[in-house]
Image: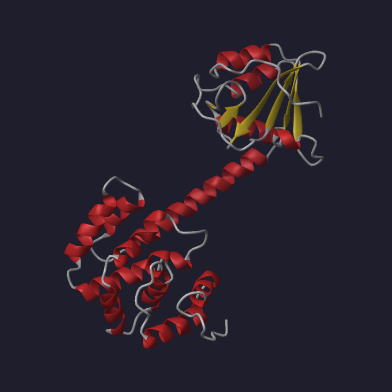
Amino acid sequence: MTDPTVPDDVDGAPTTALLESVLAQAAEVVIVEASPDELDRADAARTVVTGEDIAELARLLSVVDGGTGDRCRCPGWPTVLVSAAGGRRLALWTLHHQAALGGLGNCDAALRDGSALTRWLAGRGLTGSRDVQQSLARAAVEREDRRARWVAAAPRGLTAVAAATSRREAGAEERLVDLVARRHPDAVERVLALLAWAGFPPRQPDGTPWHELAPQRLLLAEPTELIFEALASVSPTPAQLDGAAELFTSLEWTRPPRAELPEPLRTVLIDHVTATGTDPMRFRMRHGYGAGRATGA
């Protein structure tokens, strides 16, 4: 593959007119399903565009004039190599996140129709962008399902404000704090309800969104002895034990350290997490309240 250095001045703002002017001089456009530093990869799908197809490509690559004002830090892919007759390089552009074009000007520019470009590429055997878009769509569905389940797990009377909190609406978490106090004035009942809700994240895959830690943040504002009292007042449910296990291994609880867990509670938590916990839950237990205790896990 030839040196991808682009000789043209790219100091101005990206525009579709600039893109069209470059492609109007092109004899050949090679699109490689790889970033600029991996163009020689043998397994990288590629397509060559010539003749009248270059005008169609110009339409598909049209951008929102003026650009985004920023440059994505990732190298981007596929790479679009534009050459004049004789092989002189006119431009090197990269696609970023299947939604923007980099290298056209002094910043990235949003594609006007990234989906159409993705379909066109797939039709020419470059299916990577389509696969990424499909994966992102599946992930979005999974995130929305998880968000809805977290909202549904909220204690009674909190569903609406929990939904607002999950959408990061301004002031939503402050409203949640106020409503928890008003709807659950009994301190022990409030703590137990929050513990059950706080037990939602550790059973989910792929990290914990900020909003899912709202119950834990509310619990951290409660007196330590009240939390111990609440857990001693009942036979805790599995969800409440999950929430307690997460709370007692959180950085906010351990730094600076709070009071040691009462031994009966510590034993119950160790038995519960050892028997039913996820691997991350067991890891945190062994390095937290379970340190020094043989757990068999």
Position of residue 283 relative to residue 263, above or below, is above
The one of 163 and 18 positioned closer to us in this rendering: 18
The one of 57 and 294 positioned closer to us in this rendering: 294
Position of residue 124 relative to residue 179, above or below, is above
Position of residue 63 relative to residue 293, above or below, is above
Left of 60 or right of it: where is 164?
A: left
Q: In which quarter of the image is the N terminus?
A: top right
Residue 77 can be seen in this image: yes
The one of 291 and 172 positioned closer to us in this rendering: 291
Residue 153 can be seen in this image: no
Quarter of the image where one finds residue 241: bottom left
* Residue beneath the point at 38% across and 60% down: 213
Left of 90 or right of it: where is 275?
A: left
Place of residue 276 in the rendered image (x, y in percent of width and height, measured from the top left): 50, 78
* Residue beneath the point at 70% across and 21% down: 6
Q: In which quarter of the image is the C terminus?
A: bottom right
* Residue beneath the point at 30% across and 84% down: 232
Left of 79 or right of it: where is 245?
A: left
Place of residue 81 in the rendered image (x, y in percent of width and height, measured from the top left): 72, 25
Figure disc tally? 0
Place of residue 253 in the rendered image (x, y in percent of width and height, measured from the top left): 38, 68
Quarter of the image where one finds residue 258: bottom left
The one of 283 and 279 positioned closer to us in this rendering: 283
Left of 229 or right of it: where is 50?
A: right
Position of residue 77 relative to residue 52, above or below, is below
Q: Which residue lies furthest to the front in this view?
A: 256
Place of residue 78 in the rendered image (x, y in percent of width and height, measured from the top left): 67, 34
How is the protein colored in the picture? secondary structure
